[in-house]
Amino acid sequence: MILLEPNSFVLEETLLARFTSEKPEIVDITLVDFDNVIYHVQTSAEQRTVLNLSVEMKYYDEVRAYGAEDILRREYGDYLVPTVNPQYQFTLQFNLEQLPADKAALAKHVSLIKRNVLASSFVRAFEYWESQQEGAGPLMATHYRDSEAIYVQAQHDRVTVIFSTLFKEEVDRVLGKVFLQEFVDARRQASIQNAPQVFYSSREPPLEIRHLPDLRQDESVGYVSFVLFPRHFANEEAREKTISQIQLFRDYLHYHIKCAKAYMHSRMRMRVKEFLKVINRAKPDRVTAASDKRTATGRYMRPHLRQPTSPQQGESDW
């Protein structure tokens, strides 16, 4: 099983290569991350020592309402610049001649930009819980993929996170239902009682979002609810770990579905090969003209059946 990291590894490697390069070069690289996020790393011929990182997120307008700009200013305030290309929502600019000493740490921190932006609704929900207000907080929806969304809502004693996931193939629906049901059943084990509660429903949305319009209610969609208790976000370390891990839920789910399909396909191919070997061994040997033996005169040598011996005198034919 692979271990997915919350940061973009390819973005980290690309930035680190540019940060540690002895000779600035003209760069124009486009990278794609999970959830249709696009990074554009670029330097111009006139200013090779100035590196621009532009980010495109289709759901940025939604997370902006939950405080995404405040998180960007807090994490990358020194590097934020106005965006020139309207295709991208925000841009970070780096002067390659004025970078900090620990360039690897800077590249690592910048590669977490998608995680930090998507964490805005979680941070807002945790702040609502800290305020100890009565009743449920606002329902925050982030449509981070086509026909899929993350819903976060805080209450006075918990935070509920709901994933809507879409299965485009019948096999994916069957395997996904098995995996998601296992999430629910595994929670009953005594060794993982501290894990968040998990609820899965197919086709029918949970009560928290049932009032929303335009929700899909067919066999191709499933809803997974995580109930986070204060122990999962009471301190800063637990809060950051919870946000990083729960964001990767959808990626892990579809990764395991693809691995299960690949394993079953490999087993089926292996079984077909074994069946073909059995069939090939069952074929009778064909007698051809080349296998017949001939005498010196050219006549064929045919095997003759042995003639039965006549019974001896005095013996009965019976």
Image (cartoon, rainbow, N blue to C red):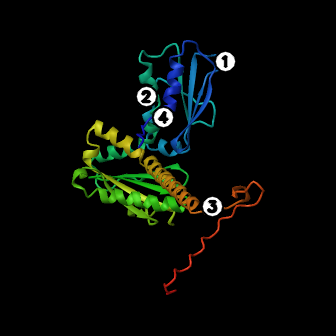
Q: Which residue is mark 2?
A: 109
Q: Position of residue 27 (x, y in %)?
A: 62, 23
Report the amino acid beneath label 3.
Asp
Q: Position of residue 63 (x, y in %)?
A: 47, 43
> Secondary structure under badge 4?
loop
Q: Which residue is mark 3?
A: 285
Q: For the residues marked 4 and 2, what is the alpha-carbon distance in whole angstroms?
A: 10 Å
Residue extending furthest toward the front: 313
Q: Earlier in the sequence, mark 3 or mark 1?
A: 1
Residue extending furthest toward the right: 297
Q: Quadrant of residue 299?
A: bottom right
- From what the image shows, is residue 221 above or below residue 93? below
Report the amino acid beneath label 2.
His
Residue 207 visible in the picture: yes
Point 49% across, 22% down: residue: 16
Q: For the residues marked 3 and 4, what is the alpha-carbon distance in whole angstroms?
A: 61 Å
| Residue 98 as seen in the image, left or right of residue 48 | left
Q: Which residue is mark 1?
A: 45
Point 26% across, 52% down: residue: 157
> Secondary structure under badge 2?
helix
